[in-house]
Amino acid sequence: MIYNNTLPIQYGAFSEIGGSSNVAKNKPTPTVEDYTNGYINRYLVKKVNENFIFEVSYITTQNINTNLYKFVEVKWRISGPKSNVYKNGILDKNGVEESNRFEIDRVKKEEGIDLSTTLTNLLEYWRGR
């Protein structure tokens, strides 16, 4: 019988790379200041070997295992006009819906992560004017 005494050492090296695979989900709660600024930053995580995407806090992104998860930051509009505003046929103000759709499209183009099935309500957190 041949015994390989290096196996526990090699296994230990692999197990330390993995770290914790439990990531706490977290939805933001916009503040009065956020509504004054007009947006919040949202942080979304995708496990590298799955298509399941969920939202986390900023602090979680600082401690996340990037071998297991890929995360993106989205600048999410929460105040302003609902739709684009035009004056004399020229875009005067970007609407919340269009801005948030642009962010979803940007992440898909730049990161390859499709947030359209996760962030389905383009007016989530919006307070109209």
Image (spheres, helix red, strand yellow):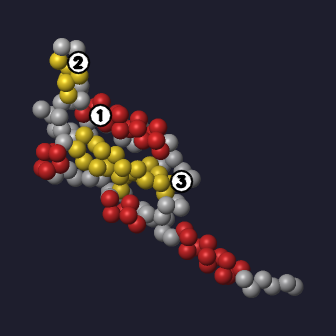
Residue at horizontal 36 percent and vertical 49 percent from the top: 73
As measured in the structure, the alpha-carbon distance from the residue carrying label 2 to the one carrying label 1 is 17 Å
Instruction: Tell me which label, 3 or 1, sits earlier in the chain.
Output: 3
Q: Residue at x 61, y 72 (%)?
A: 14
Quarter location, residue 94: top left
Identify the amino acid type marked 1: Ser
Q: Give the left or right position of residue 124, taking residue 62 as reference.
A: left
105 or 5, nearer to the observer = 105
| Rendered image: mark on residue 48 | 3
Type of amino acid at the residue the image marks with label 3: Val
Q: Where is residue 125 shown, x and y percent of the image?
A: 22, 42
N-term-proximal mark, 2 vs 3: 3
SS at badge 1:
helix
Which sits earlier in the primary sequence, circle 2 or circle 1? 2
Could you say which disc has been placed on residue 124 in the image?
none
Q: Which numbered disc, 2 or 3, marks the residue closer to the eye? A: 2
Q: Residue at x 81, y 85 (%)?
A: 3
Which residue carries the number 2 mark?
90
Quarter occupied by residue 117: top left
